[in-house]
Image (spheres, helix red, strand yellow):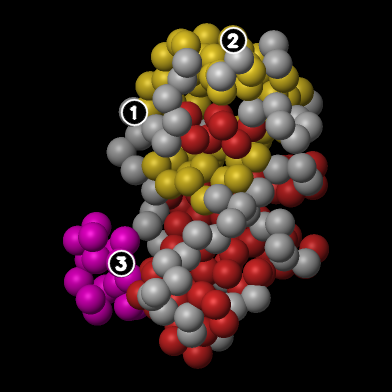
């Protein structure tokens, strides 16, 4: 379970979040909406421990949490295949198992096998985002945090990648916390939607 109790976050004198309360249990999917700068991405960083709260308590009881940023954040000195292999090998997969998973997930995100040998600098923005998505999903996290992960994709690919995420979450019974400015995208991914405001988080209809 992920729980935030009366969480606040400040950068110097500026309050980014105040009185944020959230509870996310295994299998649950929550979407976060709100204008730019209101603290949606900060909530994701707080959830996985990349940011510490200025006040309140964040408790993450999930065993494996993965944050998928809007920027792909691929290692530029590694090929696409190696970007997928590294976390799988670190998780204890054999090289054969890791390669099988890597190529299977590249196919799931509609990338040709030849893409595995490319360097990140040779990818388009949309291709890099899909590689990052494949890297996240092949790890089978029990909590997936998405920060506008499909922003560089055309509408058809956005729909397909959202459906792929939804299917993967259903199969693994993972929890999902997703930031998106696309209401239709959230409809595919979440069962609860919350508005992030300066006064806290409030559930809204989806």
Residue that badge 3 annotates: 86
Q: Can you give x and y, in whole percent of width and height, for residue 94 in the image?
A: 20, 71
The part of the image, by quadrant, that contains residue 161 is bottom right
Query: Magenta includes 98?
Result: yes
Is residue 17 visible from the viewing direction of this image?
A: no
Q: How busy is the neighbourhood of tag 3: few (under 14 within 10 Å), some, or many (20 plus)?
A: some
**Closer-to-camera residue (132/22):** 132
Nearest to the eye among marks 1 and 2: give it. Answer: 2
**Quick check: 135 above or below 76?**
above
Q: Is residue 127 left or right of residue 140?
A: right
Name the residue rendered at 69%, 11% in the picture.
199
Q: Can you give x and y, in whole percent of width and height, for residue 59 in the image?
A: 38, 21
Q: Count how many numbered circles sit on residues in the image.
A: 3
Query: Magenta includes 191?
Result: no
Residue that badge 2 annotates: 19
Residue that badge 1 annotates: 61
The part of the image, by quadrant, that contains residue 62 is top left
| Distance Cα–Cα, label 1 vs label 2 | 21 Å
Dot 3 or dot 1: first in sequence order is: 1
Q: Can you give x and y, in whole percent of width and height, for residue 204 in the image?
A: 76, 23
Q: Can you give x and y, in whole percent of width and height, for residue 85 in the image?
A: 33, 71
Identify the magenta region.
85-100
In the rendered image, the residue lying farthest to the front is 12
């Amino acid at each position: 379970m992920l729980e935030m109790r009366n969480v606040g976050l400040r950068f110097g004198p500026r309050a980014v979040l105040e009185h944020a309360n959230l509870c996310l249990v295994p299998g649950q999917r929550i979407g976060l909406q709100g204008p730019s700068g209101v603290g949606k991405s900060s909530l994701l960083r707080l959830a996985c421990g990349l940011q510490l709260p200025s006040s309140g308590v964040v408790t993450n009881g999930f065993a494996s949490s993965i944050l998928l940023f809007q920027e792909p954040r691929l290692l530029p000195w590694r090929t696409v295949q190696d970007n997928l292999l590294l976390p799988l090998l670190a998780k204890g997969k054999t090289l054969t198992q890791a390669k099988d998973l890597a190529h299977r997930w590249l196919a799931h995100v509609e990338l040709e096998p030849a893409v595995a040998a490319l360097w990140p600098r040779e990818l388009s923005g949309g291709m890099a985002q899909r590689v990052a998505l494949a890297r996240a999903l092949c790890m089978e996290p029990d909590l997936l945090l998405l920060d506008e992960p499909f922003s560089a994709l055309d509408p058809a690919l956005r729909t397909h990648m959202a459906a792929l995420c939804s299917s993967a979450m259903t199969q693994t019974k993972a929890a999902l916390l997703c930031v998106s400015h696309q209401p239709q995208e959230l409809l595919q991914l979440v069962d609860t939607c919350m508005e992030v405001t300066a006064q806290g988080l409030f559930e809204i209809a989806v």
